[in-house]
């Protein structure tokens, strides 16, 4: 394929010149890629992308000054696709990048052929995730952040943790026994459990109750 015909125009964003050089060399082996710009920070990335209008941006995340996530957010209205390419796969890196609008998320140990395929897929609008990142995101879907307990629910659970009956809890908190049961049902739902013992155990594990309930 002659250079320029159906070519995917790329910008490489990484604060390490050696990494940028390595990526440029790796991508030059494919006839359908052309690196049209480089940047070493988030601010520089936004400026370069605005100037050269690439199809896909390979974006590192942790860089001096403006980071990759802020750059992704600022490029949200640009027609380019952003493919994160970094060494980090923790929640503090993955989730903000995806929420900011990244089309994909790969790690820097991705083999050349896989990287090239990922760039083509991202250019087509497909979500591209490394296996480790996909597993992490799947875990987030399966275990969503749970709603925090209210102050009253913690009061009820603290008494339950001491072995107090529902009737005694109601008397101690000046509420009806039916209200105690309602609070406990809310607690079970929020903690993802189905009984009093499990609720107390999870509450201690999460530091919601003081002392040691074991």
Image (spheres, rainbow, N blue to C red):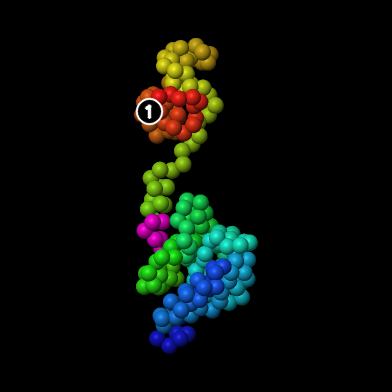
Which residue is at the far front?
18
Q: Quadrant of residue 189?
A: top left
x, y (%) of residue 212?
Answer: 45, 25
**211 versus 145 height, above or below:** above
- According to the image, label 1 marks what residue? 198
Quadrant containing the C terminus in the rendered view: top left
Residue 99 appearing in the image: no
Q: Which residues are magenta?
A: 126-133
Residue at point 51%, 22% (across, down):
155
Q: Residue at x 51, y 51 (%)?
A: 92
Q: Quadrant of residue 190?
A: top left
Q: Would you place residue 214 above or below residue 104 in this image?
A: above
Task: Indicate the quadrant containing the N terminus: top left, top right, bottom left or bottom right.
Answer: bottom left
Which residue is located at x 41 percent, y 52 percent?
137
163 and 151: which one is in front?
163
Callout 1: helix, strand or loop? helix
Residue 74 versus residue 43: which sits nearer the camera? 43
Labels in figure, total = 1
Judge from the rendering whether residue 41 lies leftward or rightward of residue 89; answer left or right. right
Residue 78 vs 183, above or below: the answer is below
- Callout 1: 10 Å neighbours few (<14), some, many (20+)? some
Q: Position of residue 27 (x, y in %)?
A: 44, 77
Image coordinates for residue 161, horizontal then vertical, percent: 44, 21
Outermost residue on the bottom side: it is 2
Residue 197 is one of the magenta-drawn residues: no
Say whether residue 2 is visible: yes
Q: Position of residue 118 (x, y in %)?
A: 40, 68
């Amino acid at each position: 394929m002659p250079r320029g015909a159906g070519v995917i125009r790329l910008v490489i964003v990484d604060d390490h010149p050696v990494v940028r050089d390595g990526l440029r060399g790796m991508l030059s082996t494919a006839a359908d890629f052309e690196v049209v710009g480089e940047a070493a920070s988030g601010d520089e990335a936004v400026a370069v992308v605005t100037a050269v209008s690439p199809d896909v941006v390979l974006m590192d995340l942790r860089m001096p000054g403006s980071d990759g996530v802020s750059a992704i957010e600022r490029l949200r209205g640009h027609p380019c696709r952003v493919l994160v390419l970094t060494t980090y796969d923790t929640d503090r890196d993955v989730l903000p990048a995806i929420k900011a609008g990244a089309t994909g998320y790969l790690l820097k140990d991705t083999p050349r052929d896989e990287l090239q395929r990922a760039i083509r897929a991202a250019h087509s609008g497909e979500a591209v995730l490394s296996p480790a990142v996909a597993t992490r995101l799947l875990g987030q879907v399966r275990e969503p952040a749970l709603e925090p307990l209210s102050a009253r629910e913690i009061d009820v659970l603290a008494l339950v943790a001491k072995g107090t009956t529902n009737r005694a809890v109601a008397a101690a908190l000046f509420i009806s026994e039916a209200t105690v049961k309602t609070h406990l049902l809310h607690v079970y739902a929020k903690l993802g459990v189905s009984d009093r013992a499990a609720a107390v155990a999870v509450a201690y594990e999460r530091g919601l109750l003081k002392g040691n309930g074991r």
